[in-house]
Image: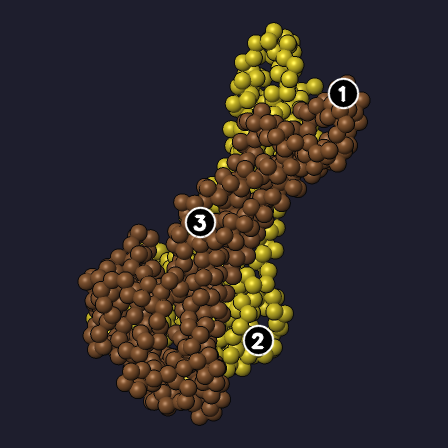
Chain colours: A brown, B yellow
């Protein structure tokens, strides 16, 4: 017969101080783990969901980043005529020649200057990126020193409000709008007119990259192969989504360190939980013996104590997750190896993250509870009763 | 039996509990050491005294903009400038794009590079060999160890920024005060292969004459090019490197909050144990008092007990932390994040001090209550 769980709950209540302290210890571990996992989930979202599956990104062969590209602007005319490119209302192919450059901007919170990606694009560039929605103001007009800024830029940098002027490259740029691309990498970019930006950054006559909008996924695949296989072009086409997936590497070190931190903290907490449970068993040696005398079997005592430990860790997990709630949605940046600038992402507490955290706490409780429970179940009835 | 012996004995009277506590604290302090080392490497490590004399000049707009190579000779005319060498980021791929095969590659001028990098040691014959081979490269000796390179080996760097693949021969190995994971080759090689690389420099590394000259040189360089189409920004090498770390985001807050969580969790664990073990001995305290021990002695005994347990955890933890750092530096996928980081003496001492403080704080409340206990009440106590 199983020992009712209310017995364990009452026991946890009885030794309030011990329960709270151990649960808090577990809670802190869970909070740290959730924090790190939410960080990674946000990072994943910023890169993996960036880009559009219909967009083919063209760069110079051998180039791994838009930043390091650079090919002759006349090649763009050849690219535009390739089959499979979607047409706009006027029958013009939807294609955009672009430059991605880096400007240094001061952070709003005064923590120094940071590299920011600035993208110069042709008007079709906006059509190519339907995910980016204007939240304030308007888009930049061609031929003007105007820029629109991503949401993260607006949040993190001073002078990034509509009608403000941003000071980079050779002078002032008027901010005319703010866009939101749903937490993807674009949110960390500043967009403006291709020619204006090329002039300011001394990049006239060339293009860093070109974007072609394919009519459908199959056409996108064909288009990228066509570009890469053309020996005269010396260019390489790839899906925009693949380009961003590769950049997730930027979080590699964070991933490693996060994992190590979480595991080490978990081991430490398991020992602490074990301590508490051993004490619980020692306190109740007589009680356990009495339970045995009444007729509860060894397995049911083992289960009961493991359950008690699991309850303790669940309590810890709940507190830990609650402690973490205020941080959910907080944004931070990661230095991007590909763009040499900061990509901002938000802590993202997904259901998966919460579930993993609970599982994580339960494993700690299981490890911390099993050995003491084993001891409880195995003790000699007579000696225990006498003790 | 001396008091010290008494304290050590009682610290481990419940072996299992003490060992579990020590282990729990060990892991927490391991983490603390780990985080503090990263902090130290990022923000405190000032590098060698020679490196404090180095400045980096870049285009004011950002690192991606190049400056005319003619700036080099102009910078040289500034008083307080001892040497100037162009330093160009090549950003090529060695073998494949995997992060573990990534290292920094700079194109420079072999004749002057090591006159700026005065704290980098390279044998004179190797330096001469490098200067004589335009397709030669000198590599960090630690990096050479990692990849198993020997002098005379050939390495191929596939260009990503520049459309050229460099076929380089290792002519020398240098030892830097801290591993740099960098290689230096002759920028002429790139210039001859790629038209747009000619006449440009990404950054200039400058060696100033004395510490007083450093801010003056920085100001003078930037003033010199202030009104030109390519204005500059000059800062110390350390500030330049910090700029990269800043771009990783709120690392400071991130590390601090983890450290805080760890210390607090340790305090909870240790306070828990101390409370348990002291409460159990209420009777024993009464006996000690009957024998004539004063309150102060009893307080001291219990605090000492707490400190011993956490100190052992602290020492073990920081030693393991040092091991972890070394192991992770070479882990695949880690890139250069921990390059050159080591647990320093001060980090070690700080970790041990934190451990001792945790022991002290966690023991003081229960010890105070124990010392206050009334003898008769205490003797009656049955736990």
How packed mark 3 is, by other alpha carbons closer than 10 Å (few <14, some 14-19, many 20 or more), is some
Residue A321 is marked as none
> Quick check: A295 above or below A107?
above
Find residue A309 and report its horizontal and vertical position in percent: 63, 36
Residue A184 in sight from this viewpoint: yes
Frontmost of labels 1 and 2 is: 1
Q: Are marks 3 and 2 on the same chain?
A: yes
Q: Locate residue B78 relative to residue B84 in the image: left or right.
A: left
Q: Residue at coordinates 55% horizontally, 57% vertically from top-left?
A: A256
Find residue B139 and report its horizontal and vertical position in percent: 54, 70
How packed mark 1 is, by other alpha carbons closer than 10 Å (few <14, some 14-19, many 20 or more), is some
Structural distance between the alpha carbons of marks 1 and 2: 70 Å
Specify which label sits upstream in the sequence, 3 or 2: 2
The quarter of the picture where residue A271 lies is: top right
Does dot 1 land on a helix, a strand or a loop? Answer: helix
Q: Residue at coordinates 42% horizontally, 59% vertically from top-left?
A: A334
Structural distance between the alpha carbons of marks 3 and 2: 34 Å
In this rendered view, identify the residue nearer to me: B122 or A195: A195
Q: Locate residue B232 relative to residue B128 in the image: left or right.
A: left
Does dot 3 land on a helix, a strand or a loop? Answer: helix
Q: Which residue is mark 2?
A: B95
Do callouts 1 and 2 mark residues in contact (Cβ within 8 Å)?
Answer: no
């Amino acid at each position: 017969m199983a020992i009712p769980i209310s017995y364990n709950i009452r026991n946890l209540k009885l030794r309030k101080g011990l329960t709270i302290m151990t649960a808090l210890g577990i809670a802190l571990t869970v909070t740290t783990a959730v924090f790190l996992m939410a960080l990674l989930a946000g990072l994943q979202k910023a890169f993996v969901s960036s880009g559009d599956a219909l967009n083919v990104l063209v760069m110079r062969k051998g180039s791994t980043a838009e930043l390091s590209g650079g090919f002759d602007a006349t090649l763009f005319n050849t690219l535009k005529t390739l089959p499979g490119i979607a047409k706009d209302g006027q029958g013009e192919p939807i294609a955009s020649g672009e430059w991605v450059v880096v400007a240094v901007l001061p952070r709003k919170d005064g923590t120094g200057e940071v590299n920011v990606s600035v993208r110069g694009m042709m008007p079709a560039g906006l059509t190519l990126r339907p995910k980016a929605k204007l939240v304030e103001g308007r888009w930049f007009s061609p031929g003007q020193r105007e820029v629109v800024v991503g949401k993260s830029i607006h949040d993190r940098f001073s002078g990034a409000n509509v009608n403000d002027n941003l000071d980079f490259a050779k002078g002032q740029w008027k901010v005319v709008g703010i866009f939101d691309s749903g937490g993807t990498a674009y949110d960390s970019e500043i967009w403006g007119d291709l020619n204006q930006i090329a002039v300011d950054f001394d990049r006239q006559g060339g293009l860093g990259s070109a974007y072609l909008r394919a009519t459908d996924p199959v056409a996108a695949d064909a288009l990228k192969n066509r570009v890469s296989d053309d020996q005269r072009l010396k260019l390489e086409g790839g899906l925009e989504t693949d380009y961003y997936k590769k950049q997730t590497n930027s979080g590699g070190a964070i991933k490693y360190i996060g994992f190590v931190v979480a595991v080490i903290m978990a081991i430490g907490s398991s020992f602490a939980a074990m301590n508490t449970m051993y004490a619980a068993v020692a306190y109740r040696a007589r009680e356990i013996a009495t339970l045995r005398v009444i007729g509860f079997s060894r397995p049911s005592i083992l289960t009961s104590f493991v359950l008690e430990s699991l309850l303790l860790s669940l309590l810890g997990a709940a507190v830990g997750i609650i402690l973490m709630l205020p941080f959910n949605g907080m944004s931070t940046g990661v230095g991007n190896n590909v763009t040499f600038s900061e990509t901002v992402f938000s802590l993202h507490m997904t259901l998966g993250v919460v579930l993993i955290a609970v599982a994580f706490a339960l494993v700690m409780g299981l490890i911390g509870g099993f050995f003491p429970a084993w001891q409880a179940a195995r003790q000699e009835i007579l000696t225990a009763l006498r003790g | 039996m001396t008091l010290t012996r008494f304290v050590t004995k009682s610290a481990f009277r419940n072996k299992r509990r003490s060992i579990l506590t020590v282990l729990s604290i060990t892991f927490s302090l391991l983490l603390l050491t780990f985080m503090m080392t990263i902090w130290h490497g990022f923000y405190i490590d000032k590098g060698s005294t020679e490196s404090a004399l180095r400045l980096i000049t870049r285009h004011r707009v950002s690192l991606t903009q190049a400056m005319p190579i003619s700036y080099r000779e102009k910078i040289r005319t500034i008083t307080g400038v001892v040497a100037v060498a162009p330093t160009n980021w090549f950003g090529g791929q060695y073998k494949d794009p995997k992060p573990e095969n990534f290292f920094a590659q700079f194109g420079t001028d072999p004749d002057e590079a090591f006159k700026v990098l005065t704290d980098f040691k390279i044998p004179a014959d190797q330096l001469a060999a490098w200067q004589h081979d335009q397709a030669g490269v000198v590599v960090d000796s630690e990096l050479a160890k990692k990849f198993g390179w020997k002098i005379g080996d050939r390495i191929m760097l596939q260009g990503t920024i520049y459309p050229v693949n460099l076929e380089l021969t290792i002519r020398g190995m240098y030892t830097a005060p801290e591993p740099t994971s960098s290689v230096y080759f002759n920028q002429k090689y790139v210039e001859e292969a790629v038209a747009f690389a000619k006449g440009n420099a990404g950054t200039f590394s400058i060696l100033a004459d004395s510490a007083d000259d450093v801010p003056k040189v920085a100001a003078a360089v930037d003033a010199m090019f202030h009104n030109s189409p390519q204005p500059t920004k000059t800062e110390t090498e350390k500030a330049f490197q910090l700029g990269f770390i800043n771009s990783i985001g709120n690392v400071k807050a991130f590390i601090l909050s983890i450290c805080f969580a760890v210390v607090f969790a340790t305090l909870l664990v240790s306070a828990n144990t101390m409370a348990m073990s002291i409460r159990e001995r209420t009777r024993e305290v009464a006996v000690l008092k009957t024998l004539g021990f004063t309150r102060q002695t009893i307080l001291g005994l219990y605090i000492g007990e707490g400190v011993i347990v956490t100190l052992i955890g602290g020492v073990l933890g920081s030693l393991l932390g040092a091991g972890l750092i070394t192991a992770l530096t070479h882990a695949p996928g880690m890139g250069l994040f921990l390059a050159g980081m080591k647990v320093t003496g001060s980090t070690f001492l700080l970790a041990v001090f934190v451990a001792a403080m945790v022991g002290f704080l966690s023991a003081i409340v229960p010890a105070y209550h124990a010392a206050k206990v009334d003898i008769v009440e205490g003797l009656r106590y049955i736990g």
